[in-house]
Each structure stands twice: as structure tokens, then as C-alpha cells.
Amino acid sequence: MCEVLEISTSNYYKYRNTVDPDYQDYLLIKKVFEENKQSYGYRRITDELRDEYGWVVNHKKVLRVMKKYDVAAKYIKDIKPNYTKHHFEEQVQNDHFQRNFHQPGWVTDITYLTLRRNGPRAYLSTIMDLETRDWIAYNISSRNDLALVMDTLKQAIAITKNLNGLVLHSDQGFQYLSTEYKMVCESNGIVVSHSRKGNPLDNAVIESFHSILKKETLYNHNITSLDEYVQLVHEWMIFYNTKRRRNRKK
């Protein structure tokens, strides 16, 4: 298995059934950060943890966890573009599929749902199984953010029994390069895989799926509102997995 996935045996056993020790602390820190409109720095978050949650923690630990999971106010991130770019580049993993999609694994992507070019949008995040060509999990949100991807990933993990060594492939969207995404994947035995930058064909299966979805929903119906479009997508997703006839490549 390790030879096929091109990962070392030591890394496989290191991350198998391993949970990042900082992850639970991160969840509480992130909760405080979001409760305060994503504006607090590590010192204010430390005070809030102490006063509101009774957690006496060193501010240096809070700062370390925030840096590790890239928790920072937007204006702080904006003044560090070079660091952020470097951080994301370090997170890019190899393409384990090399456009050979006739093998076990998952693919994932986000597409937008809109009625017109400059109109309101919703965002669809999908994870698809390459063997069955069924979607494993999906979520629709008004925001194209990390939460959308993480909700979809956690939903897929919750309904799947054996994940050790499973490859999950995506493009290089910022959500898929985030520390949280990487940590959750690795702690569940999932091998992260990325397309080359600017190469949609490296993730052709999920790209094609989202294209078919739009053709059979938006272009086949007289939709008048985004809410109506989103409801139609929900219905089509159920139809796709349960009734829609499709060619299954062997």
C-alpha cells in the first residue's frame, strides 16, 4: 500500500490513528476567535479563554496554535502575503492519480451556483468516490470558505468505515492547502493529493460531474431565484445517486 501511494512506511504508521495534540485546543481558540468577529489577536484570546472558559493558558501557546492553524484577523493576513503564499506552497502534496481515475480513491472540488454572471451565488462542495462515481458527501453554502470544505470532509469521514491509505484528490484551492484540512485528513489516515496549479484536467472527474449538474439543473429549468436553484440542486444530487442512469467505466 505504501509503495503504491508513494509514501514511506514510517509516515504511514506515524499518522495512522493519530490525532494532533493541539487540535482540541485549536477548536476552542477558533470558537473564541469567531465569537469575537474574527478580530482578536492571541493576547485578547488568551484573556477571553481565562475569563470566559476558565482555561489558564500561556499566551505563547495560544500564539503557537494560532500560527499553526493560520488563525488570524484578515487585516493581519493581508499584510503578510509572502508568508501566506509560502505557507500554502509548503502544503501542496503530490498528484497521486496522475489523471488515472480508474482506481480507488476520492476526488473533491467546489463549484459556484448562480443564475447570472454578477448575481448572488451559492457554493457547492462535493466529495466523489472514483470506484462507484457516486458522491460521498456534499454541502451548499453562501460562503466559499474553509468551513464549507471541512463540513463536507467531516461528513464523508463520519459515514466511511476504513479510511487508512485512501487518497483524497483536489485542486490547490486555499481550503485544500489549509493546515486544518491537512491535519484532519492525516489524523484519519487519508492521503492528501493535489492537482498541478492551473490544470483542471488533473481533477477531470469531479469537474465533469459539476458540469453535468449545471446542465441538468440550471439549463433544463426555468429558474427564477437562487433559492429555487439550490433546492433543485439538492433534489438532483439525490436523483444522481439513486436513480439517474449513467455509463460506468470499468
Image (cartoon, grey):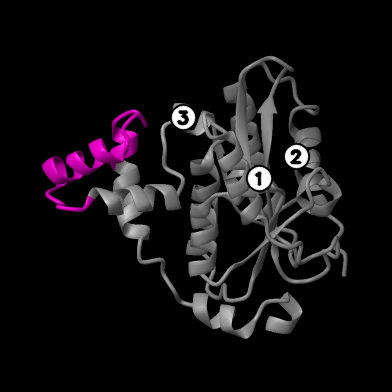
Q: Could you say whether the residue bearing mark 2 is in a helix, strand or loop?
A: helix
Which picture quadrant has residue 96? bottom right
Asked whether disc 2 touches disc 1, contact meaning CB atoms under 8 Å apart, the reply is: yes
24 and 121: which is toward the camera: 24
Tag 1 residue: 237
Q: Residue 116 carries which label?
A: none
Tag 2 residue: 213
98 and 85: which is toward the camera: 85
Q: Which residues are the magenta region?
A: 32-58
How many residues crowd around disc 1 within 10 Å: few (fewer than 14), some, or many (20 or more)?
Answer: some
Q: Which of marks 3 and 2 is in front?
A: 3
In percent of width and height, residue 193 lies at 69, 61
Task: Determine the CA span between mark 3 and mark 1.
Answer: 34 Å
Quadrant where the N terminus sits is: bottom right
| Magenta highlight on residue 90 | no
Kind of residue at disc 3: Lys
How many residues crowd around disc 3 within 10 Å: few (fewer than 14), some, or many (20 or more)?
Answer: few
| Magenta highlight on residue 46 | yes
